[in-house]
Amino acid sequence: MPISLSSMEDNNTRIPPCKIIRRSIYTLLQNYHYFTTTTALLAFPFSATILLSHTFIPSSSSSLLQLIYSRLEAFFEAAGFPRSSGFFTLINLKLSQTISANIFTLPFTLTFLLVAKASVIQALNHHKPCLQPSFSSVISIFSHLFVTYVWNSFLIISANATAFCLLFFIFSFLEGLGYYTPTCLLFLSASGAVLYSIILANTLIICNLSLVLSGFEKSGGHMAILKACIMIRDRASTALTIALPVNMGMAGIEALFQYRIGEKSGILMGLEATLIAYMYSILIVLDTIMNCQFYRSCKASSCVDQEWKYAYRIEISEEDNRGYLSLKVSEEFP
């Protein structure tokens, strides 16, 4: 009489976004002194620089900002985008400000920000954070994060180029068909804004996950990006939901900094600016913790998916009149 042993796995093991957010906040509060001293202070120089850049670069007549804006305007005009569209005027201004701010903060990004992220990843790579982290281990993680960040920069540039190419073909195609009325142009601008936002949001999610992955698995570069693309498959909505609260908080702190500080000066304003920059550093740490928790959930779900994909059945039967046992293994797919 045959005996059958079947592996029974449930594929409904994906952690919901709200639970990942709760776990991240719990991890931050459980190790509050570690994350608010070591890692937050490491990220503080970057936070102060990014807040200052978002405040003073747009309001100043920076030669770098004017140069980037004119170059992008010439690019949009040469590509055939309508100059009357407010969408491309707005995106030109925002891109110019973002590029100028990134250039201004690049030294702090490649040092303080990556070291802060490396310290968080190293802490969460163990069961408990190390109150006195090893400098060599942080540097070893930092080297992988540095290489991955460079590749992420190329990925973001490629994503922007892809989005603009798609918008160019769409506008050119509809212009050739004669659908170029003001109403149609407004609809296309709104659709283009949504398309561009979706492409950029998914790209940033992949970049954040690849940084965490390179720190956990100690393999930086393009392989970390490829692994992140595979890991995030069918989980983009979860990643967007997780990233939304922290990004809204960062945007709120940037608006608060511009409202309270601006071009003011004085000791009290300096203390207030320091406090706001420290709050921004806490959100950077929390964002890194959320990405680490999301990586772990993706990793656990991938393991379950792999086991379910290769579910097997073992059949043991006895041959007639011989006394031999027959072992039969067959793969089952859901």
Image: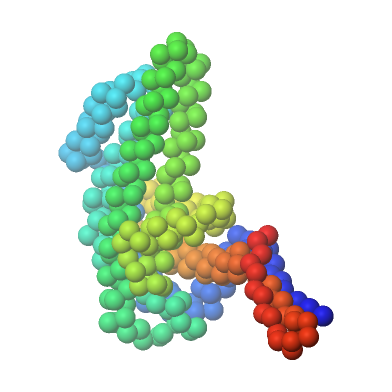
Residue 271, x across and y down, in percent:
35, 64
Q: Is residue 208 left or right of residue 325?
A: left
Q: Is residue 5 left or right of residue 285?
A: right
Answer yes or no: is residue 55 visible: no
Picture quarter containing residue 59? top left
Residue sitting nearer the eye, 167 or 301: 301
Picture quarter containing residue 218? bottom left
Residue sitting nearer the eye, 52 or 139: 139
Residue furthest to the bottom: 323
Residue 266, x across and y down, in percent:
29, 57
Residue 33, x across and y down, in percent:
45, 79
Q: Is residue 87 left or right of residue 297?
A: left
Tell me what residue is drawn at x 35 percent, y 40 percent.
Answer: 160
Q: Is residue 334 above or below residue 166?
A: below
Picture quarter containing residue 333? bottom right
Tell me what residue is drawn at x 52 percent, y 68 percent.
Answer: 299
Residue furthest to the front: 321
How are the residues colored? rainbow
Residue sitting nearer the eye, 229 or 288: 229
Answer yes or no: is residue 100 visible: yes
| Count of numbered circles in the view | 0
Q: Quadrant of the N terminus?
A: bottom right
Q: Quadrant of the C terminus?
A: bottom right
Q: Is residue 146 left or right of residue 3?
A: left
Tell me what residue is drawn at x 41 percent, y 51 percent.
Answer: 204
Residue 288, x across and y down, in percent:
44, 65
Tell me what residue is drawn at x 23 percent, y 37 percent.
Answer: 68
Q: Is residue 244 above or below residue 198?
A: below
